[in-house]
Amino acid sequence: MKHIISALVQNQPGVLAHIAGMFAARGFNIDSLVVGRTEDPELSRMTIVVIGDDRTLEQVRKQLGKIVPVVKVRDFADVPCVQRDLVLIRVHTPPTKRPEVTQLVNLFRGKVVDVAHDSLLVELAGTEDKLEAFIDLVRPYGIRELARTGVIAMSRGSQSAKQERQQDVS
Amino acid sequence: MTNKKTDSKAAKSYIGFSGAEVFHEMLLSEGVDLMFGFPGGAVLPIFDVLYKSPIRFIMSRHEQGATHMADGYARSTGRVGVVLATSGPGATNIVTGLATANMDSVALVAFTGQVKSFMIGNDAFQEADVTGITRPVTKHNFLVKRVEDLGRVVKEAFYIARTGRPGPVLVDIAVDATAAKLAEEPDLTPNLPGYKPRLTGHIRQIRAAADAINASERPVFYVGGGVVISGASQELRALAEKAQIPVTTTLLGLGTFDETSPLALQMLGMHGTAAANYAIQECDCLIAVGARFDDRVTGNLAKFAPNAKVIHIDVDPASISKNVEVDIPVVGDAKDSLKRMLDLLKPNERKGWLAKINAWKKKYPLKYEIDGKIKPQEVVDLIGKMTDHDAIIATGVGQHQMWTAQFYGWRRPRQIITSGGLGTMGYGCPAAIGAQFGNPGATVIDIDGDGSFSMTMVEVITAVGHAQPVKFVVLDNEYLGMVRQWQEMFYGRRYSSVAHPCPDFAVIAEGYGAKGMKVSERSELADAINQMLKHEGPVVLHVKVEPEENVYPMVAPGKNLHEMDLGKLA
């Protein structure tokens, strides 16, 4: 099963290597890993999508918690949350196909961000499912290039990273 | 030093101090009076400060030796061991020592020099990415590039190393950070928002554990190194005696439970006693304390303690349910948790269970035959008796290690100094020296194998140079014995690269300035051990033993604990 794990970490050199190294050393599978700043300059947030059974995920959470610069670990599996992934995709689109592809982009509330004579560059954000569905639909046209950010997530409600940090690690 | 404006709590100003001087002040404030290591270019400013320091610096002959010395010192005293090495090869040489300490939860702080901060990443002379290399084998590590950070990081390193589940912490320090002088008052307040060891077990869990033990008919304590680290031996004994619960220990837990107690089952696992392994397989309640269900303990995981409700007390939450699904976890310090459990346990005689256990003990005692050449077990047995089972014993890794675990006769914690998790050959000689530094006046013996001893025996000269009266007993079977045993048992006696011709260790010892002795006859053995123990300086006693003796019982890898091969014990 896929879990979205969010780790608040101290913003210092080596943290990413430490976490990536731990996943590799213990044989955990990372589907995606995103690191970015938070509203607190001392903290970064890593959002890691991990595939595994409940026992593996329990170990993932505990091993993350053991890493000294990791301040807080949350698993969004049973938490109402908003999750987003963003894709940039260059679709092979000769001028005759432009209306069709553009229509698909509009249906998915995506954006065409660049046009060349035989391709369109599309930006689309949403849940992973939505992105997968769109990618499947444009595949027959020919995907020239594709880049995804990986999932970021946030629980619903009003908590800030600072407040999250103050709760006990459990 | 002019007294400028400082933090109201800080008694002292560090303005004008060099990084090396601040480093030194922090070591003193942590109570360090002894450190082990080897000098080099990137740590010259630190060695310059040590020149006039009250801290004793013990120079080893190889950085690996220094790290094992600090480890032996830490295990035998419960204090933090300190290591100092230079950049590049100095730092890579300590990696084995760090990994050894990491697997066995030993509190070490290792300092390594690093090339100048602006040269890092340029493949400078004696540069290595030391924090990158050591990250997987330390509890935590730091790279310090600025003199302003040095004091705080040293404090954080000691705090992390000795608290929670202890472990090695490495601090890599760019040489310019030790040479630079402080222009402003440094902030020494630790900044570790993510590090909060949970020491107090939840009372609800402790109660649930006590209820499960009270309801059980056939409970067993399975205790490991965590009981040594937290100093919980007395609490363990009180619980075991109150509710008449037998106790088996892991290799690292040896000594936490006096083996003369009628409740003692000695060691469990691959080379554990039959009584311990049978008790685990038949128990209905397994109380694991400060142990981590290592594969050498459990055998086939699926059939380990198949009938038991499992209670696990450990300070490291990640140890719980890692290998074996635990029914009642207690995350907390062993001593505190056991102490709070004492009043909750009901006295119980458990006559039936103990009778069964005693029958196993009587039927399958650890034993060996006294015939032919000197038996390695008999050497350990004799040393145990001749030292009143009161010496500090270090070992290397292999057959001799298992025989030492089985036959010495352990009475108190911190008596055995051995590499359990990593199984580091060559650990014994330097670790024994470190233990002797930490325990002046105590009898410290390295019971070693010829293979292990050959790897690090150069450190005998360190013992000689500092007049440390360590005794090194080398059980020489002219084989890498444990590997040979596996080749005999599982590879059709195809002895591949296990023959291990040895030099005359007694002559080498004399060359180093120690006393050297060699025996090969049973009739000379007791006298030789006696002479060794009486000698005031370091001694190497080379004992030629039966070459093809095997360690029994043995649970073959992947087999169930109760399917052990009893060999000659059956």
Image (cartoon, coloured by chain):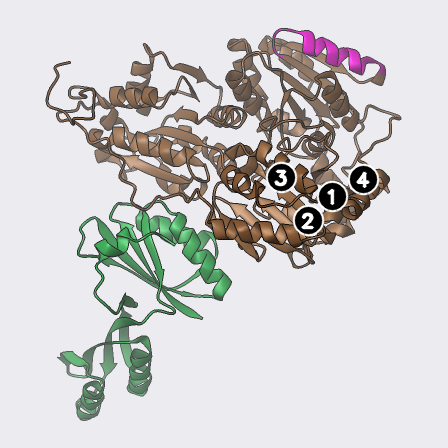
**Residue receiving disc 2:** B219
Chain letter, disc 1 residue: B
Q: Type of residue at label 2? A: Pro
Report which residue position mark 4 lands on: B361
Residue denoted by label 1: B349
Residue B233 position in % (x across, y down) = 59, 33
Q: Residues within 10 Å of mark 2 (few under 14, many from 20)?
A: many
Chain identifier of the brown chain? B
Chain containing the residue with disc 3: B
Q: Which residue occupies the extreme right position in the image?
A: B371
N-terminal of the two: label 2 or label 1? 2
Kind of residue indicated by mark 4 = Lys
- Confirm or deny contact between disc 4 and disc 1 (CB under 8 A): no
Residue B237 included in the magenta stretch of the image: no
Mark 2 belongs to which subunit?
B
The CA distance from mark 2 to mark 4 is: 17 Å
- Name the image quarter holding residue B30: top left
Foreground label between 4 and 1: 1
Q: Secondary structure at mark 1?
A: loop
Q: Quadrant of the C terminus of chain B?
A: top right
Q: Which mark is residue B254?
A: none
Q: Earlier in the sequence, mark 2 or mark 3?
A: 2
Where does label 3 land, which residue?
B239
Dot 4 or dot 3: first in sequence order is 3
Question: Which contiguous range is marked in magenta?
Answer: B523-538
- How far separated are the C-alphas under marks 2 and 3? 12 Å
State the hue of chain A: green
Residue B424 seen in the current view: no
Between circles 2 and 4, the one closer to the viewer is 2
Same chain for the residues under marks 4 and 1 in the image: yes
Q: Marks 4/3: CA distance? A: 22 Å
Q: Quick check: is B537 in the magenta stretch? A: yes
